[in-house]
Each structure stands twice: as C-alpha cells, then as structure tokens.
Amino acid sequence: MFGHDTSKEPSREWAVIVKEQRCPFVEKRCYKVRKSQPEISIGTCTVKYGNEPIIICPLRLLERRQIFVDCLHLLTGHEPGNELHIVPEISVPGGSIDYMLASVRAGKVRDFVGIELQTLDTTGTVWPERQRFLESKDVVGLDAADLRNPKSYGMNWKMTAKTILVQLHHKIQTFEGVNKHLVLVLQDRLLDYMGREFSFQHISQEARTSDPMHFHAYAVKCENERSISLVRRVSTDAVGIAMCRGLQSEAKLDLQVILMAIEQRITTKTRFDFQQPPLPVSVELDQS
C-alpha cells in the first residue's frame, strides 16, 4: 500500500502513511482515488491473488525508472551527446502512447521508442480489504460499514488481455510504418496468461531488435521491499499481433506528425533524470 509491503513491515506507521497518501513511484500524491471520495487516495498498487503478488496500478511499473533503461537498446538512432526525454501521452491512431522515450538533439527528435504500461484490471473492490488491514494496524477513524462489507476483488484477466491486444494491433501498424519500436511493459503473470489463452506460438521467444513490437515482462521480487525485475523479453511485428486475435486495421500516421507531437511536448521536466520520476500518465478512477 502506497509502495510499502504490508506483509513484511508490521511496525510501519500506517496512520501516517495513509494520511500522506504519497506514491513513491511518482513522488506525488497517489492518483488512484475513490470516485465517491476523490479526496481519498486508495494506494493499493499491488495485491495478493493466488498466493502471488499482482500489480494493479501501471504507475507501480515506474520504480527506479528501470523500464526506460531497459528500452535504451531500441533507440538505434541515439548518439552520444543527445539528450533523453520521457514524454507522456502522445496521441496515435487507436488511442495514445503512455510514454515516448526520445533521443533529442537541439530540440529535434532523432529517434524514439513508444512505451505502453499494462497491469491487471480488477473486478469487485479492494476497498473493504484495505480498510480491514488498516483496522488490524490500529488505524482509527475507519467506517464500520466498510469493515463489514463482504465484497472482495478478483482479476479481470480475459478483458485486460483482449483490450490490450486490440489496442496494440491499431498502434503497432503505425510504429512499423515509420520503422520505430513499440514496447508493452507488463507483469510476467499477465504475459503468461496471454501466451496460454491466445495464439502466441509465432511470437519470437528471443526478442529481436529488428521486430517493431516488444513485450517486456517484469516479475515482483520479494527480497526486502518488493521490487520489479525484467525476467522475459519477446517480440513480433504487426502481422504477429494480428494473428493473436485476427484483428484488422488500417491505422497509419506520418512520421513527421509523430515527431512534431513529441517535440511540442519536450520541456525541462521531460528530460530523463534518475533523481526525479517522469511525468505520470493518466490512471483510472476507482469505482468503489
């Protein structure tokens, strides 16, 4: 909760943590709020499901900015002296790209990689479980109705996987058309599910730089504070994504349009910096 491991740190000052509502991955207030009470941040970025941790907030993947470092090799046009920028939410056919990692010289983009973040959507609500945990840590001022609420939560595996494959099929045609890379960052358990439930036999199990579509799968490691680690990389192209579900699309976008969209968003705040997190992308409001 709020980046702190609830299973290993029983002595934490949970009343203070909940009051601060701080997300350590963007170093700001947690953006995941209750729809009915927008002044309250929920802070549940990872939950236990099937005795294993499942990431449910995409901003959780921003830990240490490692996902951007793991995409540097795909910036084949990057040269010494160029600046690196992390530009959020650039519109392309089929939606928007969460982040563009761009190599920039003198304000002009020399190369870029699109990075999409995908975590599991939940069914039901995590809120009652959250409140009961806080009660067990002697946090006061909790609503008794929340504590008695029998509702629980589950993982919406199928809809999450279907939705992202549809979106990827629209977007990868654009990136392939301008000879650039698109990376989907996700948890290893979600990639495993997609491999079982969809046609992934043709997906290259050894990621190739020549492929435009890359999957970077991260595992949640349990040593000390839970952290994420890249454990698997696979790749394919637009035809490969289409084969997963047999989708069709004619989405195209001119390279100069993408370059202009990135360059218009470049500021000192987008510059790649290990000392400060990238600008956060939009997250869904909790419906509970």
Image: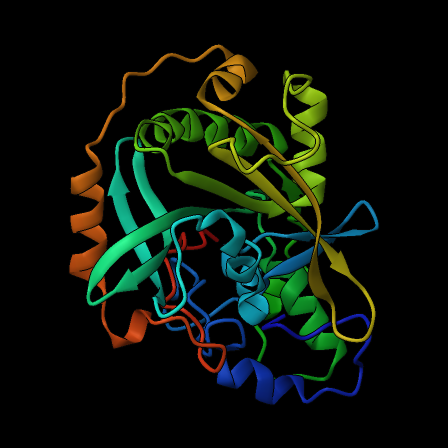
Render colour scheme: rainbow
Could you say which quadrant of the image residue 9 lies in? bottom right
x and y, in percent, of residue 93 in the image: 26, 31
The answer to whether one can see residue 43 in this image is: no
x and y, in percent, of residue 117 in the image: 49, 48
Q: Is residue 255 above or below residue 13?
A: above
x and y, in percent, of residue 254 in the image: 19, 33
Residue reaching furthest to the front = 80
Q: Nearer the viewer, residue 74 or 186?
A: 74
Q: Nearer the viewer, residue 95 or 72?
A: 72
Q: Is residue 223 above or below residue 238?
A: below
Q: Is residue 268 left or right of residue 6?
A: left
Q: How many marks?
A: 0
Q: Is residue 52 left or right of residue 285?
A: right
Residue at image position (63%, 36%) is 207
x and y, in percent, of residue 109 in the image: 25, 55
Residue at image position (45%, 62%) is 32
The answer to whether one can see residue 225 in this image is: yes
Could you say which quadrant of the image residue 278 lies in? bottom left
Q: Is residue 18 above or below residue 158?
A: below
Could you say which quadrant of the image residue 252 lies in? top left
Q: Is residue 185 above or below residue 135?
A: above
Residue at image position (64%, 48%) is 151
Q: Is residue 183 left or right of residue 175?
A: right
